[in-house]
Image (cartoon, rainbow, N blue to C red):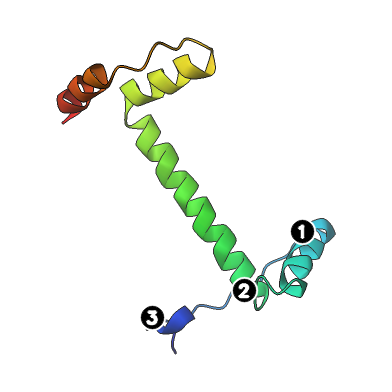
């Protein structure tokens, strides 16, 4: 069996239960023509969840970046200096 967009991946069928609010949301997306069917919506949502998990793993595995983001979120920012950024980038490898 061929997968989405002819990638040659085998599809696995799953049955899911959704709250009415989520079911209505999926139906609205399909009805708008943005997605062809229910499965496309679910696959798109899962791809986004996977990206989110990968970003979180990257952030958690990169303490200096996580600290910088935390500082920026709390308003602790400084003037942008390309030389400093270049030096820090080289140190991170």
Please say if the residues under marks 2 and 1 sit with CB atoms less than 8 Å apart: no
Check disc 3 and report the residue beneath it.
7
Q: Nearer the viewer, residue 85 or 93?
A: 85
Which residue is found at the position 53% from the left and 54% from the top?
A: 48
Horizontally, is 93 left or right of 13 in the view?
left
Position of residue 9 measured from the top left corner of the image (x, y, whole percent): 39, 80
Quarter of the figure with the C terminus: top left
Position of residue 41 measured from the top left corner of the image (x, y, whole percent): 63, 67
Check disc 1 and report the residue beneath it.
22
Check disc 2 and report the residue beneath it.
39
- Find numbered disc 1 in the image and state the secondary structure of the residue it sits on: helix
- For residue 73, say whether it is visible: yes
- Which quarter of the figure has residue 27? bottom right
Nearer-N-terminus badge (2/1) = 1
The residues tagged by marks 3 and 2 sit, at their Cα atoms, a distance apart of 16 Å
Residue 46 image label: none
Q: Nearer the viewer, residue 65 or 85?
A: 85
Neighbor class of circle 3 (other Cα within 10 Å; few <14, some 14-19, many 20+) is: few
Q: Nearer the viewer, residue 53 or 85?
A: 85
- Which quarter of the figure has residue 45? bottom right
- For residue 3, say whether it is visible: no
């Amino acid at each position: 069996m061929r997968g989405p967009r002819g990638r040659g991946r085998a599809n696995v069928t799953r049955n899911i239960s959704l709250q009415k609010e989520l079911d209505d949301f999926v139906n609205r997306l399909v009805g708008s023509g943005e997605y062809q069917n229910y499965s496309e919506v679910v696959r798109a949502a899962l791809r986004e969840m996977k990206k989110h998990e990968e970003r979180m793993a990257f952030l958690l595995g990169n303490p200096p970046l996580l600290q910088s983001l935390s500082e920026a979120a709390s308003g602790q920012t400084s003037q942008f200096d390309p030389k400093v950024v270049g030096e820090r980038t080289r140190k991170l490898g």
